[in-house]
Amino acid sequence: MIQFFDVGKRFGDRVALADVNFKIPRGQFVFLRGPSGAGKTTLLKLIYRAESPSEGQILVNGRNVGSIPKRKVPFLRRTIGVVFQEFSLIERRTVSDNVTYLPRILGERRPERRRLAAEALAKVGLDHLQDAFPAELSGGEQQRVAIARALISRPQILIADEPTGNLDPELSRDIISLFFEINRQGTTVILATHNPSLRRRGRDRILKLESGRLVEDRIMDPISAEDIPVALGPPDPVATR
Amino acid sequence: MIQFFDVGKRFGDRVALADVNFKIPRGQFVFLRGPSGAGKTTLLKLIYRAESPSEGQILVNGRNVGSIPKRKVPFLRRTIGVVFQEFSLIERRTVSDNVTYLPRILGERRPERRRLAAEALAKVGLDHLQDAFPAELSGGEQQRVAIARALISRPQILIADEPTGNLDPELSRDIISLFFEINRQGTTVILATHNPSLRRRGRDRILKLESGRLVEDRIMDPISAEDIPVALGPPDPVATR
Amino acid sequence: MTFFQALSHFLREAGLNLVRGWRVSILAVVTIAASLYVGGVFLILSHGISSSVENWRGEARVVAYLEAETTAVRVEEIRRRVESASWVIGVETISSAEASDRFSETFPEISDLVASQGEAALPPSLEISLAPDRVEPPVLQDWLEQLAEFPEVAMVDDDRRWLAQVDVFASLLRLLGLVLGVVLLGAAVFTTATVIRLTAHVYRREIAVQRLVGGTEFYIRGPFVIEGVLQGLLGGILSAMAIGFSFSLLAARGPAQLAGGLFALEPLSWRLLVQVVAVGAAAGLLGALLSLRREI
Amino acid sequence: MTFFQALSHFLREAGLNLVRGWRVSILAVVTIAASLYVGGVFLILSHGISSSVENWRGEARVVAYLEAETTAVRVEEIRRRVESASWVIGVETISSAEASDRFSETFPEISDLVASQGEAALPPSLEISLAPDRVEPPVLQDWLEQLAEFPEVAMVDDDRRWLAQVDVFASLLRLLGLVLGVVLLGAAVFTTATVIRLTAHVYRREIAVQRLVGGTEFYIRGPFVIEGVLQGLLGGILSAMAIGFSFSLLAARGPAQLAGGLFALEPLSWRLLVQVVAVGAAAGLLGALLSLRREI
Ligand SMILES: Nc1ncnc2c1ncn2[C@@H]1O[C@H](COP(=O)(O)OP(=O)(O)OP(=O)(O)O)[C@@H](O)[C@H]1O
Ligand SMILES: Nc1ncnc2c1ncn2[C@@H]1O[C@H](COP(=O)(O)OP(=O)(O)OP(=O)(O)O)[C@@H](O)[C@H]1O
Ligand SMILES: [Mg+2]
Ligand SMILES: [Mg+2]
């Protein structure tokens, strides 16, 4: 469960986020929308504590993310799989080693890691590239490696920031289907994307940012795939506006 | 004018391109299509000599790109504006300095550079971010800075590799319109993109790659915006297939 | 991840960094080696001199030069008087002729000159061996002054004064060695810290990614710490080898020729070499920890 | 872009690199400074000794020690014989008493001893000043041997033999200084090259981007070359300052006390300091060029 209470984020005097309130129950699938520079990446970074909020509080699985001691942050991050907007692969490591970075820390042995990597890479159609280095991959291939890495530890929360920006429509649809599949197994998924042609399902949530403000929060209609608006405002326990 | 004669490119034993033949006349607008890993980026890199072909020859404005001495490569590149798939901004320089890197080398003075930067950044909607550093920008903002940099020196050829991957549909349309505008002024534009919803115009060309092979080469119908196939094969002077 | 898994991981990563960045690593290794070498050599030298001084001090000598005209009987009388003191171990009478012989042995070059002066050139003397530990220094001092006041005693030459000077010299040498060693070791720690900070800077993106995907600081910084320790170990081993080599060169020339026997070359102890290596490793560790404090 | 625009651009970029990476830059600057300092000091010392030797050689002296019993008349006779040679500039007669005075001046510590021997302790002598350039060495040699065969001449002491030894010593010192300086300078060049290579490695992405957007090698590498030169200049200036400081310390102690006047401290020339700085800059440039050859 992820909750934002009156969250704001400033960089110097640039305001990236302001007055953001919402609550994402466990197992929900959320599309995060908004034009370039609206604050999507910033919002996601706050969840995995790559940034700290300037105002307000953030709860992730009941813990106040802003007050987790620095030492404990890695353990928060291990419960969250993240596909970063800039891919962020480790140049000096093979695809397989990139994907299994976390299992390795956790003490998994090499044969088991190879198996895990092959499994995750197969999901994104890249099992033939296990031993390549990131620099040898195309843009879309790198993006898929980053997706495989986010999936490897079966996280409770999956965050994906524009994960299909470098993928063709067909692959994009496959990846979204993969996310749907993962979501069906209970994982909370938050997907920031511009791609308007992504398949929609009922009960999926849409959050829309504009200039750092949450301007839309609705759940799609399960039957018509038409959208049902959700009341804006702090999610729980009282409305402040 | 850009011509490919039987061009192939291998990386070790991975084949990225094979038997590619085409001719792009000056002033044409070309969409380069193909699934992830098809070889689009590799093809573009061959044009501005970031890679050398393993087979075949490439002419750009009548010069054999493969045989240009290393010393002269920068001068080829200055005639080609490139929007790289990975943005590639210089971290330590401000947006304005990134955009005017080339004018600076060419001896433009600071006030003139500021003017040029403001002009180019205005085209992509970022004139307010002149003095920011790349790390302070959102993904879409970085992508637009890279576009502004490619435009700055009014190149004869503009190459853009997935330039709208991180942009919302509205901005994407604006950017494509910008490219159309630049094309109308005589610049040859080659645009590699997955985005299927981009506006189409008559007389624009579509090249489609699959697994490193050119599988489609056609010109769109000016009236119906339906596509008219163009004969595949080496463009000039004789057909080999 | 178990401790051994972590350690083997750190070692592998650190080894890779060392090999990939061998050019920078050499800087760290060489400064560590050089500082340990200089410090070690100075310590060995000063230690050698000090222990010679200790030896000599145990058998301290005082020479009483007599007037040339003193009769043998009177010499014998003085000698007996001297021997009566409880701290005197032995007294040897050196005649004029014996003195000349000794002189020409020690300074063959100038001996012609002395020879041309005839027998009387050097005065007879009494060489008195003392056990300084059997007496309070002020009492000994008084006794020496009384000795000097005998009409036949021309001059009393106290070896120990010179020994004290040599001792001061050895201390100075040791101090200089320590200061130089510490300064150089400081430079070595700084170099190691810089080299490791740089390596970290080169891989700053990778480190950021590791943090983002949930790597702990322990896991991320470990390889850098081990890298520092490895550099220190290498530096220490290098300098231990250099010290051993220099030492064997000196030893081959024979102890007699070493500064006129001024110092005793004691056998090189393995303990010292192990200490040198350990100090190197510690310097590397310190450098690594310093560089990690803030920058990585 | 004009040359001056390029240069000012290079200077600005190189300055930025130096300031941002001051920790690494210090390594390069300090090794350059240290090597130049060591080389410079050795050169100055050996030069000082050599030029003292030159001075002394110009006024080379031979001392003929006479038997103690030689009569004044006989001394005068020998003196006249000696003066008749064309290469003799002057002859001074030193009586026994004068010799003793001189001795106690030079070695006040042992003078008691000499004093106790009475007047006859040191023999009289003739100090002969020569102009060695007026005569062939073998002829001079023969002449000296004849002189030694006079019955009254006890010994002929030829200063020049000793001077030749000092000269060899000075040459050795100079050689040692050169070798050390060259080795250290090599290390400095290596360090500079490493530091610059590293800086380039840290910014490898930026460099790649510059290439991709059409930057020429001249424009991309220029700042690194200037960075090397700046490091060299800084190192050179530091060591010139250190040399000047050491020199003024020495000079303050008074030339008489310098190794018993063994060497003449000539005034420190600005030319030398400028040369030191120039060598530093050259070392930095060389380091930069080496690092650029392949890696950037
Ligand atoms: N570190 C930073 N320093 C200063 N400003 C920043 C920083 N990070 C983000 N910003 C600003 O905050 C705003 C929101 O950025 P964010 O990356 O969240 O946008 P976004 O919605 O992810 O956009 P995009 O779709 O283009 O990726 C942008 O205007 C950006 O310039
Ligand atoms: N330096 C390299 N070494 C090895 N293989 C490479 C290298 N560069 C590209 N490839 C391979 O060549 C193929 C084509 O890559 P390219 O980047 O041209 O694809 P693309 O069409 O641009 O794909 P995308 O849409 O995902 O960016 C890919 O399979 C890639 O793995
Ligand atoms: Mg973003
Ligand atoms: Mg591509």
Image: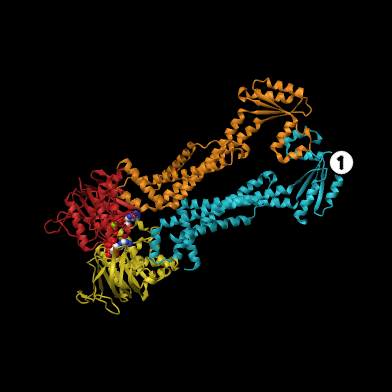
Chain colours: A red, B yellow, C orange, D cyan
Decide which of D283, B181 is in the foreground and name it. D283
State the image coordinates of residue A186 (x, y, percent, origin top left): 18, 49
Drawn side of residue C220 relative to residue C246, left or right: left
State the image coordinates of residue D294 (x, y, percent, origin top left): 44, 61
Is the residue marked by circle 1 packed among few (<14), some (14-19), or many (20+) residues within 10 Å? few
For residue D3, above or below residue C120: below
State the image coordinates of residue C47 (x, y, percent, origin top left): 55, 35
Q: Amino acid at mark 1?
A: Thr
Quadrant of residue B192 within the rendered picture: bottom left
Decide which of A69, B236 is in the foreground and name it. B236
Q: Secondary structure at mark 1?
A: loop
Inspect this view and state whether residue B166 appears. no
Ligand 2 under 8 Å from disc 1 Cβ: no
Q: Residue at x 59, y 30 (%)?
A: C55
| Location of mark 1 (residue) | D71
Q: Residue furthest right?
A: D73
For residue B196, above or below residue C82: below
Ligand 1 found in image quarter: bottom left
- Tell which subunit mark 1 falls on: D
Quadrant of residue A66 within the rendered picture: top left
Q: Residue at x 63, y 49 (%)?
A: D247
Inspect this view and state whether residue B78 appears. yes
- Quadrant for the N terminus of chain C, please: top left
Decide which of D192, C125 is in the foreground and name it. C125
Q: Residue furthest left?
A: A223
For residue B16, above or below residue B2: above
Drawn side of residue C260 relative to residue B191, left or right: right
Q: How many numbered marks does the figure carry?
A: 1
State the image coordinates of residue D101 (x, y, percent, origin top left): 78, 39
Q: Residue furthest bottom?
A: B237
Q: Residue at x 80, y 54 (%)?
A: D87
